Image (tube, helix red, strand yellow):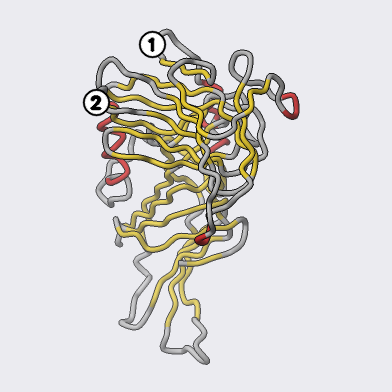
Amino acid sequence: MKNYYIKYHFAFLLTALTLIGCGNSVVKSGDLVEVNKLTLNGDWKFHTIYGEGSNYLNIVETENDIIIDNTDANVEAHGKWETKKTAARNSGFYKTDYAQHNFSITNLKGGQKDDDSYFRFYPNLEASGYYEAFTKFPFASHLTAQYNIKHAQGTTTKYISQRTFCNEWISLGIFDFNSTDKNYVEVTAIVSGSVAADAVMFRPVAKEKYLKAKEEPNQVFLSDFDDSDWDDLSVPGHWGMNNAYSNYTGKGWYRKSIALPKSWTKASDDRYYLKFDGVYHLSKVYLNGQFIGKNRGRFYTFRI
């Protein structure tokens, strides 16, 4: 009996999953003949890594947070940003107003980008350290507002839809900031649409917590990783079935150990594949520590 460890990365909803053995010795016209099947439904382990997402309803401002509003002195608006005091669809925003710019030029596929507008928030940190960056915005039409976070290791880019989770603190990730650098969170876009620049927040993160969070993504898919303290989750299922994650947005990790039946035998030309009835909506799959494939889509069957 051999144990296999399968890991899922960035899957919102994981439906029925099966491990299938195929014998090629009786293949005709290139078709696979299914010989053995093992359902992988049932109990799985689930985990989120700090900095890869957050439960926005749990984010409450504290006195230790550094909050920068669009009207503060340490902001920079490049281009024509309009100050607005009301937001579309009755959505809220931070304090009394926010800035908005309508991007009309795209630079996708080598297109000419004449509109290089951006809005930057500078934290002006007194000491170097680790922080989680958040953004808050009202409803705007842009589905992929571009956030560029300048930190000690360079610049990290995130794309956020400004049509959902409006007037909530949305995590952009955790970063190492050097106080002597010109750190910032920049809001811009590479495709047309209106973008809102309202407020950003920097929350201090303990060094130990930061370092652990940065190491975990390189460890959790390994076959000898200890997942005993992970949460239990039933598959088919959604992480929202666990109340602790009902409002979580970000990346999630699913993990399961597989014991193949002793009755399974493998000829030299036999192959195995994983069949998924559906994963919503992005996924990467690891088997015994090796990346074996990914899928982008909605609820349709695919296999790896």
How far apart are labels 2 and 1 at the CA level? 18 Å
Up/down of 79 relative to 236, above or below = above
Of all residues shown, which one is farthest toward the right? 89
Q: Residues within 10 Å of mark 2 (few under 14, many from 20)?
A: few
Tell me where residue 184 sits by quadrant. Answer: top left
Q: Residue at x 59, y 30 (%)?
A: 81
* Residue type indicated by callout 2: Glu
Q: Which quadrant of the figure contains the C terminus?
A: bottom left
Residue 274 in view of the camera: yes
Q: Secondary structure at mark 1?
A: loop
Depth order, front residue of 220/52: 52
Depth order, front residue of 192/114: 114
Q: Residues within 10 Å of mark 1 (few under 14, many from 20)?
A: few
Q: Secondary structure at mark 2?
A: helix
* Residue type indicated by callout 1: Asn
Report the residue marked by disc 1. 64
Q: Which quadrant of the figure contains the N terminus?
A: bottom left
Badge 2 or badge 1: first in the primary sequence:
1
Left or right of 10? Residue 182 is left
- Front tag of 2 and 1: 1
Q: Residue at x 63, y 27 (%)?
A: 82
* Contact, mark 2 vs mark 1 (Cβ under 8 Å): no
Q: Where residue 106 sits in the image (x, y, percent)?
A: 57, 52
Report the residue marked by disc 2. 208
Q: Where residue 275 sits in the image (x, y, percent)?
A: 51, 65
Up/down of 57 relative to 13, above or below = above
Q: Where residue 273 sits in the image (x, y, percent)?
A: 44, 69
Residue 55 in view of the camera: no
Depth order, front residue of 138/122: 122
Q: Residue at x 49, y 81 (%)?
A: 32
Q: Residue at x 37, y 71 (%)?
A: 264
Up/down of 26 relative to 298, above or below = below
